[in-house]
Amino acid sequence: MKISSRLLSWFRRNRRDLPWRKNRSSYSVWISEIMLQQTALKTVIPYFEKWMKRFPDVQTLATATEAEVLRQWEGLGYYSRARNILKTAQIIVKDFNSTMPENERDLLRLPGIGKYTAAAILSIVFGKPIPLIDANVRKVGRRLFGLEKWESSSEKYLFDWLSDVLPPRRAGDFNEALMELGQTVCLLENPICKNCPLKKDCVAFAQNLTEKIPGYSARPLIEKKSILLLLIHEQKILIRQKKEGLWKNMWVLPDFTSRKKAKDFIFEITGGKGRFLKALPERIHHYTRYRDRLAPMVYTVEPLSPIKQKGLIWVKISALNQYPFPSQHRKILDNFIS
């Protein structure tokens, strides 16, 4: 039996019931593929379901504000993905009559859609015979061919091989099957080789190299500590809008790298009229390469008027749900309010 037949037979028996597989529209595939970038599948599932209830189609999404989109994305991280999704939805509605383009050239012009996402849409939705190579497929390929080192020529070799074995009429199923194999069987550590439909073709399995290939080297985390201020005045709290970086256009609690800087800020805002109430439990926030220890401090204040710093506003505590926050800031606020 050919490799493609064995893989598809395995996929038919073991295919997971994922929400984006219930509706193979270009919209649902596009949203799921963007969410799955740098985010674990089990994390994505509830976010995808919540998203589809709020924005069931590209037309609904295109009319949303950036704040609404960021609020819905809150907790998934890498927020540029959400901003690009909104831009792309607006372009699809305006320039493509609310229909996803069916060719790579137009897809690659859309914000946030690169060659991989374009290939996913074209193969899974439109049945185009284009191989997909993500981290999972690359891992399977390295073990199949026994590649201890991954070089620039390796990617082309894998792409050419996939192009040869990919069944033209079932390109989407084949691509999904190979990714699923990498996610559920060909694991980075302790792969379940006995369940693999490709083990008889696998060099790493034959030579007992599955723990050595592909290998894993974790990047060291950069440790940080941030003082977060919850400044309270007449049932309002002071928040700041980020103008750049990972959290561009999102709202945060004012954050500082030292207690002195935090106290200087309080003095600037209040002229010294601030009273410390309590410290909230610290939280650890992991993002990109950082491990940030967040130390929230609650003060009641009598602010000077007007606030001189741009991007700072007083918001009613009861209205905080209208503003998008990074997940840990939201959890700190929820903990304080409760």
Image: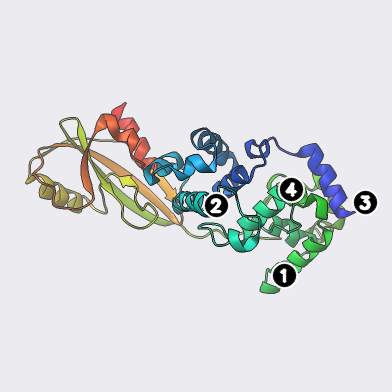
Picture residue at 51% right of the left edge, 34% below the top: 50
Quadrant in the rendering for residue 221: bottom left
Sequence-earlier tag: 3 or 1: 3
Sequence-earlier tag: 4 or 3: 3
User: Do the residues bearing badges 3 and 1 touch, measured as CB atoms within 8 Å?
Assistant: no
Q: Mark 2 points at which residue?
A: 38
Picture disc at residue 1: 3
Q: Can you say which quadrant of the picture contains the C terminus?
A: top left
Give the Cα separation between the discs numbered 4 and 3: 18 Å
Mark 3 closeness class: few <14, some 14–19, many ≥20 residues within 10 Å? few
Sequence-earlier tag: 2 or 1: 2
Q: Is residue 218 above or below residue 304?
A: below
Sequence-earlier tag: 4 or 1: 1
User: Do the residues bearing badges 2 and 1 touch, measured as CB atoms within 8 Å?
Assistant: no
Residue 98 appears in view: yes
Picture disc at residue 181: 4
Out of 61 and 166, give the one closest to the viewer.
Answer: 61
Give the Cα separation between the discs numbered 3 and 1: 25 Å
Residue 283 appears in view: no
Give the Cα separation between the discs numbered 2 and 1: 23 Å
Which kind of residue does numbered mark 2 sit on? Gln
Picture residue at 55% right of the left edge, 34% below the top: 49
Q: Name the residue under label 1.
A: 156
